[in-house]
Image: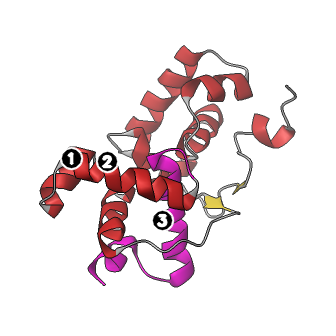
Amino acid sequence: MQISANQQAGECHGMAPPVQPTESVTRLPEDVARVARLIACGHPDKEVAHRLGITEQAVRNAVRAAKRLLGVERRAQFAAVLPIRCGDAKVAVLSPQQESVMALVADGKRNKEIGRTLNIAAGTVHVHLTRIFQKLDVHNRVQAAIWWRNRATKTGAAPSQQMEA
């Protein structure tokens, strides 16, 4: 498998490089930033390691460093703090409940936390996420969160404002 120059630079297919780096992003060392961007795009550690030609342990170390430098607790929150855009965002209609779930997913909440906030079972959250992933043709919550943030950017509303609407 050949790796393109963009992939080596830490950009994934369908993703544009960061547009306007924030102060915390500019503090990231280049190798940590490449790993963080790929993780924010939803790529698993093994794939990131393969794309960048580093070990999975080096990926985990870079993720720990990025969490510390960006001030986030979970890798799912990278998509919220790194300025990445998806070039092929899908148009999908989500139910109001699915939109509420997505707003909380985009904020980095876990299923149990989402369930408590919305007064639904964690299993129901899982069912909503499965249907959302099918509608958006994504494979995980990070990719779905990126789609949600891109939609918020296009509509000009903050994701939390979309949930309240």
Disc 2 vs disc 3: Cβ atoms closer than 8 Å? no
Label located before the other in sequence (2 or 3): 2
Is 18 placed above or below 12 here?
below
User: Could you classify mark 3 by the number of other residues whose Cα lies within 10 Å: few (under 14), some (14-19), or many (20 or more)?
Assistant: many
Alpha carbons under labels 1 and 2: distance apart = 6 Å
**In the rendered image, which residue does mark 1 sit on?**
122
Q: Amino acid at mark 3?
A: Trp
User: Could you classify mark 2 by the number of other residues whose Cα lies within 10 Å: few (under 14), some (14-19), or many (20 or more)?
Assistant: some
Q: Which residues are magenta?
A: 138-165
Helix, strand or loop status at disc 2: helix
**Residue 16: quarter of image:** bottom right
Is 95 placed above or below 113 here?
below
Name the image quarter holding the C terminus: bottom left
Q: Amino acid at mark 2?
A: His
Q: How many marks?
A: 3
Residue 134 at x, y percent in the picture:
51, 55
Query: Image point 33% across, 51% down: which residue?
Result: 127
Name the image quarter holding the N terminus: top right
Q: Which mark is residue 43?
A: none
Disc 1 vs disc 2: Cβ atoms closer than 8 Å? yes
Helix, strand or loop status at disc 1: helix
Q: Nearer the viewer, residue 98 or 159?
A: 98
**In the rendered image, which residue does mark 3 sit on?**
148
Residue 9 at x, y percent in the picture:
75, 39
Query: Image point 83% across, 31% down: which residue?
Result: 3
Direction from residue 84 to residue 164 in the image, left or right: left
Secondary structure predominantly adopted by residues drawn in magenta: helix
User: Could you classify mark 1 by the number of other residues whose Cα lies within 10 Å: few (under 14), some (14-19), or many (20 or more)?
Assistant: some
Disc 3 vs disc 1: Cβ atoms closer than 8 Å? no
**In the rendered image, which residue does mark 2 sit on?**
126
